Amino acid sequence: MSTNTTDRPTVVMQNDRLAVDVPGQRIYELKDPDTEGKWYFVLTDQIGVSFDRNDSNQVNGMRLYQAGYTFKLPRISDVD
C-alpha cells in the first residue's frame, strides 16, 4: 500500500528496485529500462515511466505512459 501523502507520484526504492509510489494505490516496482529508456511496471507492461533530464543530466521530471496517453510530471522537490 502507498505511504505517499502527497497528491503526486513519487519515486522510491523498494526491494532493491526503483519504484513509483502512486497516492491512494500502491508502490509499483519498475523493470530495468528498455532501449527507449522506458521503465515498465513489474506488474504490467501497459504502464511505464521515463525520466526527463536537464543539461546537467539531472532528473527534472518524469513522464508516465498509460493507455496511449503521456502525462508529464515535473519534479517538485529534492529529497536530502
Image (cartoon, rainbow, N blue to C red):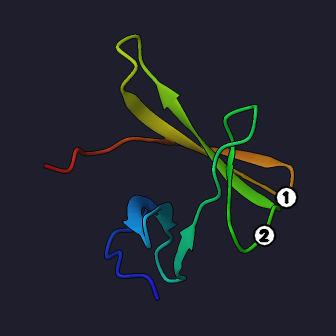
Structural distance between the alpha carbons of marks 2 and 1? 12 Å
| Residue 20: x %, y % from top left | 50, 63
Q: How many marks?
A: 2
Query: Callout 1, which amino acid?
Result: Ala
Q: Image point 57% across, 71% down: which residue? A: 28
- Relative to 33, is 7 on the left or the right? left
Which residue is situated farthest in the top direction here? Answer: 55
Q: Quadrant of residue 35?
A: top right
| Residue 23: x %, y % from top left | 46, 75
Instruction: Decide: is 40 above or below 16.
Output: above
Which residue is situated farthest in the front direction here? Answer: 16
Instruction: Decide: is 37 above or below 67.
Output: above
Is residue 28 or residue 16 the one in the foreground? Answer: 16
Please give the residue where the numbered disc 2 appears in the rendered image.
44
Local crowd at mark 1 within 10 Å, few (<14), some, or many (≥20)?
few
Q: Image point 52% across, 30% down: which residue? A: 52
Q: Image point 50% across, 71% down: which residue? A: 22
Instruction: Decide: is 47 above or below 80.
Output: below
Query: Callout 2, which amino acid?
Result: Thr
As helix, strand or loop, the secondary structure at mark 2 comes to loop
Local crowd at mark 2 within 10 Å, few (<14), some, or many (≥20)?
few
Instruction: Decide: is 5 above or below 79.
Output: below
Judged by depth in the image, the label closer to the viewer, 2 or 1, is 2
| Residue 75: x %, y % from top left | 38, 41
| Residue 73: x %, y % from top left | 51, 44
As helix, strand or loop, the secondary structure at mark 1 comes to loop
Please give the residue where the numbered disc 1 appears in the rendered image.
67
Q: Image point 66% across, 44% down: which residue? A: 33
Is residue 28 or residue 69 the one in the foreground? Answer: 28
